[in-house]
Amino acid sequence: MRILTALTALWATTLALPSTNPPPSISLNSRQGGALGSKPTSFEWQSTGPLVSAKNDGRGIAGIKDPSIVLINGTYHVFASTAQSSGYNLVYFSFKDFAQAGNAKFHYLDQAPLGTGYRAAPQVFYFTPHKTWYLIYQNGNAAYSTNKNISDPLGWTAPQVFYPAGRPKIIDDNIGAGYWVDMWVICDDKDCHLFSSDDNGQLYRSQTTLANFPNGMSQPVIALQDKKNDLFEASCVYTWGDGFADGTKYLLLVEAIDPDGNRWFRSWTSASISGPWKGLANTMENPFARWNNVKFPDDKVWTWSISHGELVRTDTDEKLRIDPCSMDFLYQGIGPDADWSDYNALPWKLGLITLRNSVCG
Ligand SMILES: *[C@@H]1O[C@H](CO)[C@@H](O)[C@H](O)[C@H]1NC(C)=O
Ligand SMILES: *[C@@H]1O[C@H](CO)[C@@H](O)[C@H](O)[C@H]1NC(C)=O
């Protein structure tokens, strides 16, 4: 309650921001050889209310989390974590319209060869060289399953791991009291890269060649480092359009925790997936996505956290290309009244934020 009052006061202050903080000029729309001249440097979003919640279907699931989403031929395909006291697994559902997302039938992936037990934080993409869908997730290691048909929830294969020798030493050396989570794969023309986080301020990256994927992941290196809460988890790396005039081409998002305990996203850009990563909108005042740059329906802030999620991708292949002109981010949020005594049983729900200040006019 104390936190909420403080936040409400902050929120009221922030409402005055638009007049002092003009949106980026639309002259940024100069295109150079297919690439945008300048990249966005600040973001303003419109959110929906909660769209997808756990279903009362006898499974006892408390929260739907960590969504990964692609749009194919007019159908959205979503993979997400199911959370309950006993642990995590995965769910798949599809729909044609966000207004109908809450009615989509849940297909629990523990029914597939992917199986029961700890599986969480999925990422889906189509790996063109194998003409196969990959689902990347955590199961104590960095794992994947494959499927020829994204619409077939029973088609996901048994887990295989990227690090057959177990958790890499560099992670043991840096993880402290953290958790090794949120694996993410993105490829360029030559290599595929695997990112992960340790909930202790480190973002890791391994790589293998495109030809060798999914085998041969190298020992990780530290891709980025900051204070624990400022570089927490849920990284996403995208090919950002066709790149920008300054040579940057990739967008990195990492979830952080603000001093009130609320989740938000910071952003960085780079000319290469292997970095170095340069801060973009990465402060609480100029975040990638945080409650203070998100408008909610009727100004009702249903969640103060914009937490683990993914940009909606219409380019579904391993390059994870997203359009800087039109970004929608499916996230997990939670009401201020939630009881945090059992982290696994928190009632996370999914909402969507849509970019309002596109640099493309
Ligand atoms: C999308 O539709 C096109 C044309 O009907 C079809 O060729 C393609 O296989 C579809 N894609 C997927 C992933 O189903
Ligand atoms: C994909 O799976 C769905 C659901 O089982 C099925 O209806 C569809 O026919 C399958 N598509 C192909 C190409 O096998």
Image: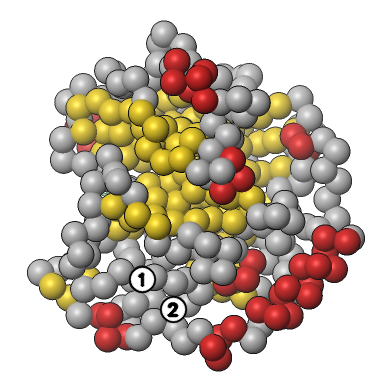
Nearer the observer, 90 or 162: 162
**Drawn side of residue 103 relative to residue 8, left or right:** left
Could you say which quadrant of the image residue 61 lies in?
A: top right
- For the point 59% across and 56% down, the residue is 264
Q: Mark 2: which amino acid?
A: Asn
Inter-mark Cα distance, 2 to 1: 9 Å
Count neighbours of disc 2 (C-alpha within 10 A) and say few if under 14, some if 14 to 19, many if 20 or more.
some
x, y percent for residue 235: 47, 44
x, y percent for residue 176: 60, 25
Nearer the observer, 119 or 341: 341
Nearer the observer, 71 or 23: 23
Could you say which quadrant of the image residue 110 lies in?
A: top right
Looking at the rendered image, the quarter that the N terminus falls into is bottom right
x, y percent for residue 81: 61, 37
Q: Mark 1: which amino acid?
A: Pro
Which mark is on residue 357? 2
Looking at the rendered image, the quarter that the C terminus falls into is bottom left
Vertical position of residue 173 compared to residue 152: above or below: above
- For the point 66% across and 55% down, the residue is 258
Q: Which residue is mark 1?
A: 40
First of labels 2, 1 by sequence position: 1
Residue contact between numbered discs 2 and 1, judged by CB atoms under 8 Å: yes
x, y percent for residue 108: 61, 32
Vertical position of residue 182 compared to residue 290: above or below: above
**Drawn side of residue 95 relative to residue 147, left or right:** right
